[in-house]
């Protein structure tokens, strides 16, 4: 009896809860404006990961960096059929589903295959292609890898959160799978013997191999290697889906896909000299890096000076916050701080660009180090100086200004210069949120050129040139100041 009562109460409570939450869930089927919304916006926002030739990849066309490939042609066709313009948003393949679900993008056109797990989260159009999965190996080792069994005890690579990752886990028995975010990084790992194979979509495998004489597509075939490729949209976006399907139908009927593929292949092989093609990427990256570092150090110095003053204050209520800030910032990784600023500002409704977020993170980080530099510089001035100044009748403030600070500056400036050198190097971490600084551009060049290693060397030389010339300049300045002693 008692038991029954409780159950019925629970059921009632459950029902109320259900009603409560149901009122927050939009009734999707009834209010599907997905197509109209895109038309009202006037732009179709397509998300993709441009590391996937011939689907989508970077190429320099008339000196301009562009994302091209047959997925892009399909996207253009869909947008023009809808009478809207196309906006391409690039991100890691593993961020696409999240971006679609949160409405940051309208469609995913990124060689994505419908899988049961994905179908729980999003809807898919009709497939526009069916392809086989392949394993790319080093040509020299090609004989060693002829069946799925041969990877027993070996490392194989696959792109994070893809069907290839799953396939490697399921069918390359006994292998351990290395999952990375970008395909060029996988190729780099393969070429430098870190892994022995990379599972790739057939056309992508062929594209990479055709660009690199040291690689080969192995004869290995998968049991479940056949995968479809389709376009993803939000769940319940039926009108948008129908529109996309009708464009896909036209593409199929008119045999346009063949054309798109041919164009993509031609673009892939369009070659110029390396620097002619990618020089501008490095220049752009370098300018961004200098800007980031300069802004970070400049504002970091201002904020850092303020922190140093707090730290030297006589009241502990001023000292404590500064001390804790400095300890916290110096005791946590810059990478984490960058993410906190980038996503934190978003949580507070500030939609800052990646560049601004990067500048803020570097400023906040650098300030903690600058504060210590300034504090140490001031403390290093002999105590007797303050006593002497005070005994001459100067106030504490005046003594600080006319006696202590001028001497402290000599300790501070060189250290501040070193901080600049450090920030130049550290700013490379900002690439993680997609600021087009040097490190980020290196990744782009790696992907576009199919050369995983050379861009890294060039980038290291650029960083070195920047830091080395800066520290030389600082050396000169320091010697000047010494002679004025
Ligand atoms: N077809 C695979 C999947 O759906 C991989 C697609 C990767 N696409 C890319 N642009 N990197 O999981």
Image (cartoon, rainbow, N blue to C red):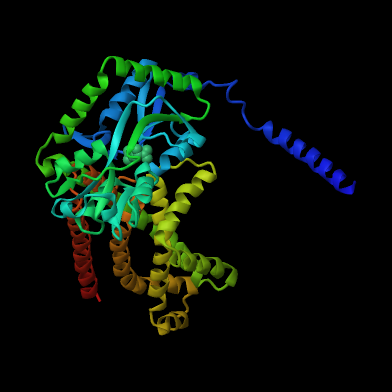
- For residue 474, side relative to residue 123 (left or right): left
How far across and how far down the image is residue 200, in percent? 28, 43
Q: Is residue 275 above or below residue 318?
A: above
- For residue 84, side relative to residue 291 (left or right): right
User: Does residue 49 appear anywhere in the picture?
Assistant: no
Q: Who is closer to the viewer here, 361 or 388? A: 361
Seen at 44% across and 57% down, the residue is 336
What is the total number of numbered labels drawn onto the structure image?
A: 0
Q: Is residue 18 above or below residue 417?
A: above
Q: Who is closer to the viewer here, 330 or 23? A: 23
**Which quadrant, please, contains the C terminus?**
bottom left
Residue projecting furthest to the right: 1
Q: Quadrant of ligand 1?
A: top left
Which quadrant holds residue 273? top left
Seen at 38% across and 73% down, the residue is 377
How far across and how far down the image is residue 442, in percent? 24, 49
Q: Is residue 34 above or below residue 113?
A: above
User: Does residue 21 appear anywhere in the picture?
Assistant: yes
Residue projecting furthest to the left: 273
How far across and how far down the image is residue 364, in percent? 44, 57
Q: Who is closer to the viewer here, 179 or 316? A: 179
How far across and how far down the image is residue 53, in percent? 24, 37
Q: Who is closer to the viewer here, 442 or 289? A: 442
Which quadrant holds residue 175? bottom left
């Amino acid at each position: 009896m008692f038991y029954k009562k409780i159950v019925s109460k629970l059921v009632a409570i459950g029902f109320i809860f259900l009603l409560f939450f149901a009122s927050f869930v939009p009734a999707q089927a009834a209010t599907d404006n997905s197509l109209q919304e895109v038309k009202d916006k006037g732009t179709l926002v397509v998300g993709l990961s441009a590391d996937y030739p011939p689907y989508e990849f970077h190429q320099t066309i008339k000196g301009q960096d562009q994302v091209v490939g047959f997925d892009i042609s399909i996207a253009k066709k869909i947008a023009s059929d809808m009478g809207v313009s196309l906006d391409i948003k690039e991100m890691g393949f593993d961020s696409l589903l999240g971006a679609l679900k949160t409405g940051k993008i309208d469609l995913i056109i990124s060689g994505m295959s419908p899988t049961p797990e994905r179908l729980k989260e999003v809807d898919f159009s009709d497939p526009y292609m069916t392809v086989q999965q392949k394993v790319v190996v080093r040509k020299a080792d090609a004989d060693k890898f002829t069946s799925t069994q041969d990877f027993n005890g070996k490392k194989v690579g696959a792109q994070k959160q893809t069907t290839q990752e799953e396939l490697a886990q399921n069918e390359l028995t006994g292998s351990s799978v290395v999952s990375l975010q970008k395909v060029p990084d996988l190729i780099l790992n393969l070429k430098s013997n870190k892994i022995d194979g990379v599972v790739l979509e057939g056309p992508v495998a062929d594209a990479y191999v055709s660009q690199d004489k040291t690689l080969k597509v192995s004869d290995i075939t998968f049991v479940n290697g056949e995968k479809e490729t389709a376009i993803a949209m939000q769940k319940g976006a039926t009108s948008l889906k129908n529109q996309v399907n009708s464009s896909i139908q036209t593409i199929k009927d008119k045999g346009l896909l063949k054309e798109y593929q041919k164009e993509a292949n031609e673009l892939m092989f369009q070659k110029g000299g390396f620097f002619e093609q990618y020089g501008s990427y490095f220049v752009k990256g370098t300018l961004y890096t200098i800007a980031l570092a300069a802004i970070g150090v400049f504002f970091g110095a201002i904020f850092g000076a303020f922190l140093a003053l707090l730290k030297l204050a006589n009241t502990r209520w001023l000292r404590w916050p500064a001390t804790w800030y400095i300890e916290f910032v110096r005791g946590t990784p810059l990478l984490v701080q960058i993410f906190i600023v980038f996503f934190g500002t978003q949580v507070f409704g500030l939609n800052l660009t990646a560049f601004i977020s990067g500048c803020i993170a570097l400023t906040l980080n650098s300030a903690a180090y600058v504060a210590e530099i300034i504090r140490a510089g001031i403390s290093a001035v002999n105590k007797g100086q303050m006593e002497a100044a005070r005994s001459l009748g100067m106030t504490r403030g005046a003594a600080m200004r006319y006696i202590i600070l001028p001497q402290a500056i000599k300790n501070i400036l060189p250290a501040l210069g070193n901080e600049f050198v450090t920030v130049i190097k550290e700013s490379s971490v900002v690439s993680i949120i997609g600021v087009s600084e040097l490190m980020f551009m290196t990744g782009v060049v790696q992907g576009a050129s199919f050369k995983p290693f050379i861009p890294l060397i060039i980038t290291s030389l650029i960083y070195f040139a920047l830091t080395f010339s800066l520290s030389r300049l600082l050396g000169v300045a320091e010697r000047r100041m010494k002679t004025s002693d």
